[in-house]
Image (cartoon, grey):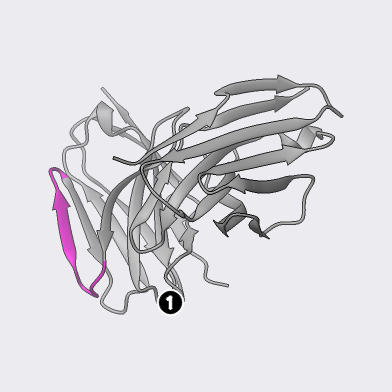
């Protein structure tokens, strides 16, 4: 069965510090992978998506970047965090028609 | 750009009441999905509706896809506290791979 792992669950980082969030998928090959950010109690903002190794599409200009070094690994990074980067970050895999499977999320607080 | 608007944004009701959540767009979608998200977790797919006019039932939840495939509704009968959460609709565009998410409806069912 397919599973998706996302860590850490919570993170408190000072302004200006770097960020690295990791997402891995098991049980499937060449998945479409997505990073979303969610404001408190609201909808999902697509940040990045990837259809294959090294292929990254950015949806929103921001202080973040993404990389896909391996088929089932998707990493969200920042060189210097801003207060506005705080939020709930979700990784997902899947295709539109089949639906997405989401990770359990990372609550990032930038202080 | 395909947009999905959900209403209401927030709904607080007593246990046993019925409710309907709406998801509307001016765009046509090839299919539409509903997700439910609990605090601190990722969204979980509830249902996919594909055919215009389609109705699907999941216990006390009834999902309907509009005839023109531009809108959808979620009706909950005799709501229970366990139904509390954020309900998200998501549309699949003609390209088939990407989902467009609505802004979500936060439901609170009080015992």
Q: Is residue A110 visible?
A: yes
Q: Residues within 10 Å of mark 1 (few under 14, many from 20)?
A: few
**Which percent across, then down, holds residue A17?**
83, 27
- Tell which of A23 and B58 is nearer to you: A23
The number of numbered discs placed on residues in the rendered structure image is 1
In-image side of B18 versus A94 (left or right): left
Chain letter belonging to callout 1? B
| Magenta residue span | B50-60
Q: Is residue A40 visible?
A: no
Picture residue at 16% right of the left edge, 38% below the top: B78
Which quarter of the figure has residue A60? bottom right
Which residue is under mark 1? B94
In-image side of B25 versus B1 (left or right): left
Which quarter of the figure has residue B39? top left
Picture residue at 62% right of the left edge, 48% below the top: A68
**Which percent across, then down, holds residue B86?**
41, 40
**Which percent across, then down, holds residue A110?**
75, 26
Secondary structure mainly formed by the magenta segment: loop
In-image side of B49 versus A14 (left or right): left
């Amino acid at each position: 069965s397919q599973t998706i792992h996302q860590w850490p669950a919570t993170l408190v980082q000072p302004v200006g510090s770097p960020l690295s969030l990791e997402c891995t998928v098991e049980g499937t090959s060449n998945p479409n992978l997505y990073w979303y950010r969610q404001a408190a109690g609201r909808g999902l903002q697509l940040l990045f998506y990837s259809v294959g190794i090294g292929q990254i599409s950015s949806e929103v200009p921001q202080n973040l970047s993404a990389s896909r070094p391996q088929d089932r690994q998707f990493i969200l990074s920042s060189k210097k965090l801003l207060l506005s980067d705080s939020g709930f970050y979700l990784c997902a895999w899947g295709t539109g028609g089949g639906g997405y499977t989401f990770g359990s999320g990372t609550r990032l607080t930038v202080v | 750009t395909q947009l999905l608007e959900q209403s209401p944004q927030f709904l607080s009701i007593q246990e046993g009441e019925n409710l309907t959540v709406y998801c509307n767009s001016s765009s046509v979608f090839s299919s539409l999905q509903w997700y439910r998200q609990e605090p601190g977790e990722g969204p979980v797919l509830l249902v996919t509706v594909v055919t215009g006019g389609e109705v699907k039932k999941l216990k006390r939840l009834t999902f309907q896809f509009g005839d023109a495939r531009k809108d959808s509704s979620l009706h909950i009968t005799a709501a229970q506290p366990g139904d509390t959460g954020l309900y998200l609709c998501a549309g699949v565009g003609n390209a088939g791979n990407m989902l467009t998410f609505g802004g979500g409806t936060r439901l609170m069912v009080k015992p």
